[in-house]
Amino acid sequence: MIDIKFNYTNALNFVSEDTVQSYQQQIDNSFQSLYNKTGRGNDFLGWMDLPENTRDELIEKIEQLAETIRSKSEVFVVIGIGGSYLGSRAVIEALSHHFVQLKENDGPVVLYAGQNISEDYLSELLQILDKKDYCLAVISKSGTTTEPAIAFRILKNHLEKKYGKEESLQRITAVTDKEKGALKQLSNEEGYETFVVPDDVGGRYSVLTPVGLLPIAVAGFNIRELLEGARKMKNHLSGSTRIVTNPVSAYAAVRNALYTSGKTTEIMVNYEPRLFYFTEWWKQLYGESEGKEQKGIFPAGVGFTTDLHSMGQYIQDGLRNIFETVISVEKPGSTLTVPHDSNNLDKLNYIAGKPMSEVNHQAEIGTTLAHIDGGVPNLKIEIPEINAGILGQLIYFFEMACAVSGYVLGVNPFDQPGVEAYKKNMFALLGKPGFEKETKAIRKGLS
Ligand code: PA5
């Protein structure tokens, strides 16, 4: 039994049930291509089997290292970008306290680096690390990505100055390719503890490899439950591919139907701020997988009710090319009620005694209805609560739906050729050897 319900009733004013069902053959073909490994990008399907193929020895090794890191650090720095950090951050932030990442004496606070090239960001991180005991993981599948490479160079220097060469070696873990890339070569030379990103798992599908599992374990969360959740979802999806019974089929069909009808932007909505980075992870997964060959739904994200006071106007009244997918949490685990006030100057006594979660829930229903009235189809993913197992289910659900949707759209959901364009220009502008031709072209373009 899975804990996720997918409901698209509130999209049926915009696309008919017949139209949604007309995708069944394409959905079946997409599942077939994935299961038989015959579709585009079929050498990157290793993520499909991670829930059951992740060996116990690997899990134990991650857990043991996580314990060691937890025992000797106040801060754990995760260096990575894109798929090499968004998955772990999504899970860690979804499971952490909003204000104190972890309780006192309960392991390190996880901080992130290498996901930008901001000097201010890294300088301020170094100020914190001056005063804290810390360990770091440098995560890069290719081992050659500029942003994490710069951050690692700077943090490695800092670590060596602070602890000396010998001790700093014990505080660095590398997660990278099994043989290729500069990071692998450096790890071999220095003797860092190393984990492998499997060849057949792309960055944005890698959260259930050591890329995500190590930081999540260091943060103190149960990676076995996460994997078990993914396993449950995999088993559930491996039955029928019918749109009526399979939530991945239904989500993939309805979002493609909406896209074809002109709804070219999908907004992922949450009502729980702890899901902010889950939305960021989802945006990368869908944006990099589908946005190519001049096609693809643009994935956006909002957190309500916060963003109802910034983006609400646009969603209600702006260009009608959007639809929403809401992650609706049934029981956020709060029992905080609105207090009675004898003066009632704020006129809130009509909700006195109600749990805040109920107020939030009614805000969700009211917003959904308003948006449907305003021409915004609404898809709903209901979960009973946020825990590691349910996050595992959600991760596998969205990965599978992304692959199926991408095949229905007719693209390769496992490559990202467009990401190279900015790099080429940046390398040329910075004078990287080998980019002389591009430098000339850019200079001409700029003049
Ligand atoms: O999904 C992807 O492949 C990318 O977003 C990568 O994760 C990202 O570019 C980081 O790459 P790497 O892990 O090689 O440093």
Image (cartoon, grey):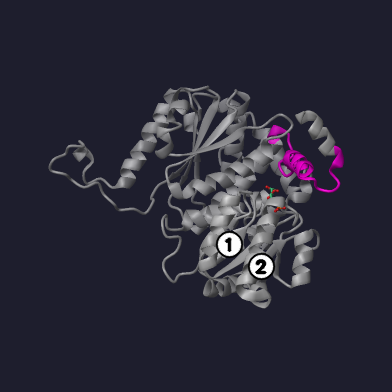
Dot 2 lies on which element?
strand
Residue 430 part of the magenta segment: yes
Which residue lies at the image location 72% right of the left edge and 56% below the top edge?
A: 141
Q: Find residue 318 and name its label.
A: none
Dot 1 lies on which element?
strand
Relative height, residue 146 to residue 132 (above, below):
above
In front of the other: 319 or 128: 128
Residue range of the region highlighted in magenta in the rendering: 408-437
Q: Position of residue 114 (x, y in %)?
A: 63, 54
In front of the other: 328 or 216: 216
Category of crowding for the residue at label 2, using alpha-carbon neighbours closer than 10 angstroms: few (below 14), some (14–19), many (at least 20): many
Horizontal relation, residue 334 to residue 80: left or right: left
Give the Cα distance between marks 1 and 2.
10 Å
Relative height, residue 308 to residue 31 (above, below):
above
Which residue lies at the image location 72% right of the left edge and 38% below the top edge?
A: 29
Which residue lies at the image location 50% right of the left edge and 33% below the top edge?
A: 324
